[in-house]
Image (spheres, helix red, strand yellow):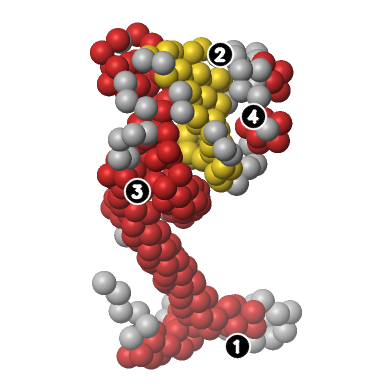
Amino acid sequence: MEAQKRQETVVNNGLAWTDMQRPAYADLAEVSRNHPSFHKLNFEDSLSKIQIPKIDRYDDHLFIVLHFPTPDKERGFVFSQLSMFVGSDYLITVHQGELKPIEELFSMCKADEKMRQTIMGRSSGYLLHKIIDTLVDDLLHLLMKVVGNIDDVEDLVFDERISVSRQIALLRREITTLRRIVINMKRIVVELTRDVQRFSKEDLGPYFKDVQDHVDKVHEALEEAKETVEIYKDTDFVLSSEKTNKILAVLTIIFTLSIPVTVVSTFYGMNVALPGGIETGPWNQLGPYTTLIFVILVSAAPAGLMFIYFYRLGWLEAHR
């Protein structure tokens, strides 16, 4: 079933916010009738999902492309692109519908007059700040989930009964995705602090500085999370290797101790005359099982000597 399109506009004090979900090229071309300065290449960028975050500067507006993460059941996080046209009395947001925070913010402006006045009552530059700030706050919440998952892995990585290699690999992928988003976002937010001021009489520097500070904190937390996960990966590898080595050591010792009995049983399995064998007649000095006792002693003696030797070398001591 094809996802439903949506195009709605909220107006407050002469400022119009148009939100477009899953638009087609014709939908963007229709909007451009009221804004002839919009470039057709920007329409193509808005519909593409592989654009690099950027700012295109024009005489009367800015075109901005940003990426934000959205949760995904299979891949953890995926890129969601947000394209924005910002002018003195309008702001147009274009996305594919995965960005729930911006949908909720638009719904609040649409339904609540007081909230609409708070968010849209100043300027398009302030509205732009509010949108980015809301999405960055959501990014913080997603980061807290990742940190919580890292804490869970910390409790499991030292449990030899559980394999956490897959969980660690998934965490590394999630952190890598978030880092790629945040690194580009840092650059864009710094540039916006200068560029968007022309659309507001109010000094927007402190507002975007606050957003920049949040993005920096997210980046620092991601760097710390990346280092922590790498430590857990190395720890899991070392512990897994140690466990494998212990298993191989036990199997090797068992095999080595069984060599004498294998050699003796091989001799007595040959079709040749051997002392105590069927051809020469069994020994009866210690009863009817004298030959069996002899074979066991001959097999156990070298095995016992090897056991004592291995013990003195420390190979049989339990590792704690």
Relative to 107, residue 193 above or below: below
Write down the residue under mark 2. 6
Query: Which mark is drawn over residue 212?
Result: 3
Q: Give the amino acid at mark 1.
A: Pro
Label 1: which secondary element = loop
Q: Which of marks 4 and 2 is nearer the N terminus?
A: 2
Please identify, in this view, whether the residue under mark 2 or under mark 3 is nearer the observer: 3
- Nearer to the camera, 125 or 210: 125
Q: Which amino acid does label 2 sit on?
A: Arg
**Most foreground residue, 274 or 176:** 176
Q: Name the residue under label 4.
A: 37
Q: Which secondary structure, mark 2?
A: strand
In the picture, the quarter occupied by the C terminus is: bottom left
Of mark 3 and mark 4, the one earlier in the sequence is 4
Label 1, label 2: how far apart the Cα atoms are: 96 Å
- In this view, 274 is above or below 230: below
Q: Residue at x 71, y 18 (%)?
A: 26
State the residue in front, 216 or 302: 216
